[in-house]
Image (cartoon, rainbow, N blue to C red):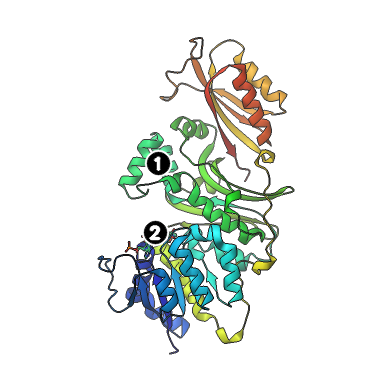
Amino acid sequence: MNEPLKIGLAGLGTVGCGVIRMLDQNNGEDIARKLGRPLKVTAVCARDKNKDRGVDISGYSWFNTPEELAKSGDIDVYVELTGGTDGPALEATKIALKRGLDVVTANKAMLAVHSTVLAKLAEENGCALLFEAAVAGGIPIVKSIKESLSGNSIQRVYGILNGTCNYMMTAMQNEGKPFDEILKAAQDEGYAEADPSFDVGGIDAAHKLALLTTLSFGTETSFDDIYIEGIEKITPEDIKAADDLGYRIKLLGVALKTDEGIEQRVHPTLVPSESAIGQVSGVTNCVCVDGDYVGKVMQVGPGAGEGPTASSVVGDLIETARIDKSANVKKTVFSMPVDKLAPYQRAPLKAHEGGYYVRLNLSDRPGTFAAVATRMAEFGISLESIVQRSHGTETDEKVDAAGVAAAPVVIITHDTTEQAVSEALKAIEEDGHIVGQPNMIRIERL
Ligand SMILES: NC(=O)c1ccc[n+]([C@@H]2O[C@H](COP(=O)([O-])OP(=O)(O)OC[C@H]3O[C@@H](n4cnc5c(N)ncnc54)[C@H](OP(=O)(O)O)[C@@H]3O)[C@@H](O)[C@H]2O)c1
């Protein structure tokens, strides 16, 4: 048996302990047989040395900080699992790469913001920087795009990239309860964090989307250019109305190549109920790729959790162990060398084309229905349907300025532009026929 691959694990939380369990307690021997060399955790770091983690760490060298581990650990590969965009995670990763160590990480927040700098460091120093676990947890989408699909010109990559949101949207669909109640239940059951803002606000999905964009289109990672809208404003009335019209509402991350640049957007989206993506429920994630030769490819699986995330980290460690350092083969972090990545060009959202769902509370007076349809027509928007809904709990008490009751109306448009819909809704609001703000949700063409 050849020399072991010596692993330094920074972070002994859900993922770090999952990696230890997978290697030291369960699959280590099989992996060594496959590789012809064992994977051995030799050094670790976390904040609290004495915390009971349910795994025995007494045989590993202990470091107090990620930076110390990256600098002085007797290791071949540094594994960043502490989390966070900047701070010790970023510093230690830079130290490891400058030292010539390969790096494996699940830290999407760090990569979404710093991947270009880190990829440059990795390639300059001849190191691997692998991050399968950072995008959709256990789904092997990074390798799929980087390797198996790399001959394709990719037009669009999209998916359900956050399990917490999908769990909540599924529960709202099944139980008909409002967002706050479903969030509380999700927190009680451990499917949502105490501070859920990263998940429900769409930030976590955007971190993953930023990386998918770079992998798919060969552009520099540009997290700041992502349009992000969370699921907080979705109501049971929206879910019920969408359902009646044959749609499900999902938080999607979408990156699309257009003539004007690349759209990157994370927002609640209507998809047909019967579509494959419409059927993905609970915490499950999925990622879809539209390639010119392969057509549409969809991968579905667990997007988070100890086992699935450790599975991806260990897969990357196995890839690292297979690298022949003496062969001097250039390793690229993305689908091409980092200096060949094109600058990211953002397509303006107002030019986005697609169908729209709009729910508004319309004053129950003669002519208002027709006035709304006329306004839409003035902005070149043709309507697939316009339906008056019965009052839901949320809309029961609404009356307009003159004290006239308002009734919820749902409109589905044919394909149009974001600009046309925004301007039409502004004009409708100014006309004074509606109460409150209209709720607009994009429909994704599949
Ligand atoms: N959990 C998932 O399902 C999942 C899925 C995909 C990707 N990820 C990513 O994987 C990474 C790890 O996630 P996790 O869920 O395992 O996190 P976690 O359970 O919160 O664990 C974080 C670990 O890092 C340690 N740590 C944090 N800051 C540190 C610092 N400044 N110095 C030393 N140690 C520090 C903590 O030490 P203590 O234990 O001593 O406090 C803890 O052991 C994150 O980037 C996350 O986004 C997680």
Mark nearer the viewer, 2 or 1: 2
Question: Which residue sits at x=34%, y=41%?
Answer: 184
Image location (x, y in percent) of residue 412: 60, 30
Q: Residues within 10 Å of mark 1 (few under 14, many from 20)?
A: many
Q: Quadrant where the N terminus lies? A: bottom left
> Residue placed at 54% from the left, 57% from the top?
112
What x and y, as percent, mark residue 41? 38, 77
Position of residue 95 measured from the top left corner of the image (x, y, whole percent): 49, 72
Q: Which residue is mark 2?
A: 305
For residue 268, the mark is none
* Residue at numbered disc 1: 171
Judge whether 409 appears above or below 68 on screen.
Answer: above
- How many numbered badges does the structure rendering display? 2
Answer whether residue 333 is visible to the viewer in this image.
no
Label 1 residue SS: helix
Q: Is mark 2 within 8 Å of ligand 1?
A: yes
Q: Is residue 64 left or right of residue 373?
A: left
Q: Is residue 365 left or right of residue 78?
A: right
Give, as a three-letter code, the residue at label 2: Gly
Can residue 2 be seen here? The reply is yes
How far, Cα to Cα, is label 2 from label 1?
19 Å
Q: Would you say 86 lies left or right of 49 here?
A: right
Q: Is residue 185 above or below residue 9?
A: above
Residue 422 location in percent, x, y? Answer: 64, 31
**Which quadrant of the picture is home to ligand 1?**
bottom left
Q: Residue at x 56, y 84 (%)?
A: 325
